[in-house]
Amino acid sequence: MRSKIYSYKKSTVIAAFIAGVSILSASTVKAQLNPFGSQYFQNQYLFNPAMAGINSGLNVNLAYSKQGVSVDGAQNMQAISLDYQAKKVGLGLSVYNENSGLFRTTRAVATYAYHIDLGGNNQKLSFGLSAGFVNQHLESSNVVGTFNDPSISHYNDNNPTYFDGDFGVSYTSNTLTLQAALPDIKTVSNANNTAEREIFFTSASYKFGGSADVNVEPKVVFRQVRGFDKIVDAGANLSFAQNAFSLQGMYHSSNSATFGFGLNKSSYSILAFYTTNTSALNAYNNGDVEVSLRFNFLKSK
């Protein structure tokens, strides 16, 4: 009788594990296709290490994103980054964490960027390099059933912590911004890894207006995600009332869209985003909500 109960529990855990992997795969696809909305305008350092320290002072960014449907184990992402401008050098630190059911992925990198002044209109040519680690594992303490099932330890043993990094370049001015980056430069190839990100990123944006009342910055982004079709994001950031308020919208060729509204002050800003689901994943949830905070300290006068 005891062996039958153990066998039943073991079968339940294995079935839950397999189901969890399937859900994680779908959620990870979603994370890859729909990154943080704040990355497009508010915190471009998350996309490109060359943007670390592009603005003066110490910049602290916090972002939290969660699937819109309130279900246990729904995917959520958190990110915190710090970047500091020291004359021509930009220093940064970025930590990203993703929870999806029993699975957790953590990525932490430090960044060095160098900014070369090119003349008037605040023109700069920047280069950035990030280096750090990625860890992905199954949270055995959250398993309901036989938490010491060998399937769990086997998964964790085959997903070790490994070295990771990013490289990026950018040209920026008061109006034009051009970027290109190679994210997720791994030294270890892991077939079991489900935390893949973009393998190539490039973007172009131009700010129109120049007045204190209304400015609009259209932006086009091209992303290549490992294992998926190329993605084009197109949209704009509209700021008005001396940049006190902003409206953002981005359409993604993965058949989703991101909408955001922001309140901006000299020392901080807060943005809220809603991203509709990709057409391939409408059965899982109805979209993501995100809150992003940005603080600026030690800004030169």
Image (tube, rainbow, N blue to C red):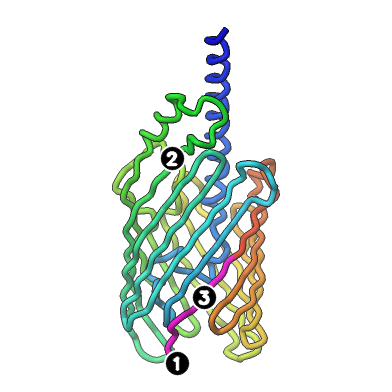
Which residue is most to the front? Answer: 2
Residue at image mark 2 = 137
* Residue at disc 2, secondary structure: strand
| Label number found at residue 145 | none
Residue 83, quarter of the rendered image: bottom left
Which quadrant, please, contains the N terminus?
Answer: top right
Residue 248: give x, y in percent of width and height: 64, 70
Q: Which amino acid type is shown beneath numbered disc 2?
A: His
Q: Which amino acid type is shown beneath numbered disc 3?
A: Phe
| Relative vertical location of residue 122 with respect to residue 41 in this rendering, above or below | below
Cα distance between the residues tagged 2 and 3: 32 Å
- Span of residues in magenta: 292-301
* Residue at disc 1, secondary structure: loop
Residue 47: give x, y in percent of width and height: 45, 63
Residue at image mark 3 = 295
Judge from the rendering whether residue 238 lies leftward or rightward of residue 111; answer left or right: right
Residue at image mark 1 = 301
Tell me if label 3 and label 1 are in contact, CB under 8 Å: no
Residue 165: give x, y in percent of width and height: 34, 56
Residue 91, quarter of the rendered image: bottom left
Which quadrant, please, contains the C terminus?
Answer: bottom left
First in sequence, mark 2 or 3: give its number: 2
Looking at the rendered structure, the number of numbered marks drawn on it comes to 3
- Which of 301/116 is in front? 301
- Which of 125/269 is in front? 269
